[in-house]
Image: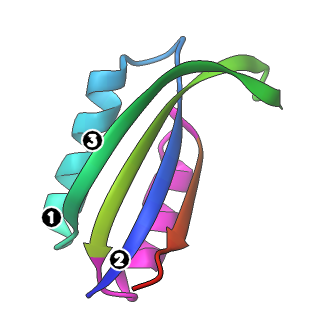
Amino acid sequence: MRNYEMMLICDVEGKSLTESLDYVKKFFNSHNVEITDEKDYGVKDLAYPINKKKRGHYYLFNIKTEKTNLQKINKEFRLYKPILRFLILKKEA
């Protein structure tokens, strides 16, 4: 398993943050993704509007998973509307 960082930007006007995080954590549990650390960075202004939104809630996950799960994560989170943007980066060992 490899280590990755995933930053989420969630919509502050739609569903609550706890609902969005519960959705993400359930998805991780069902696809054998281990959460090693998580940090809440709070609500911040976006650099540019995304879907006519000017503010987003930033949340960071440190995860361990197989490389094959990344495609599933990308597909699922692109379709989930309360997540405005996300980025997954491989951490160096």
The residue stretch that appears in magenta: 65-84
Residue at coordinates 42% horizontally, 45% vertically from top-left?
A: 60
CA neighbours of label 3 inside 10 A, class few (<14), some (14 to 19), many (20+)? few
Could you tell me residue 15's position as x and y percent? 40, 18
In the picture, measured across the screen, residue 18 lies left or right of residue 75, that is: left
Q: Nearer the viewer, residue 62 or 27?
A: 62
Residue located farthest toward the front when viewing the structure as drawn:
93
Q: Is residue 11 left or right of residue 49?
A: left
- How far is disc 1 from disc 3 in space, using C-alphas? 11 Å
Give the residue type at disc 2. Asn
Task: Say which residue label 2 marks.
Answer: 3
Q: Residue at x 27, y 41 (%)?
A: 23
Which part of the image, by quadrant, shows the N terminus? bottom left
> Compared with residue 23, is residue 74 higher up or lower down, i.e. above or below?
below
> Quick check: is 61 in the magenta stretch?
no
The C terminus sits in image quarter: bottom left
The residue type indicated by label 3 comes to Tyr
Q: Which residue is mark 3?
A: 23
Q: Badge 1 is on which residue? A: 30
C-beta proximity under 8 Å, tags 1 and 3: no
Q: Residue at x 21, y 60 (%)?
A: 36
Q: Nearer the viewer, residue 14 or 34?
A: 34
Q: Earlier in the sequence, mark 1 or mark 2?
A: 2
| Label 2 or label 3, whichever comes before in sequence order | 2
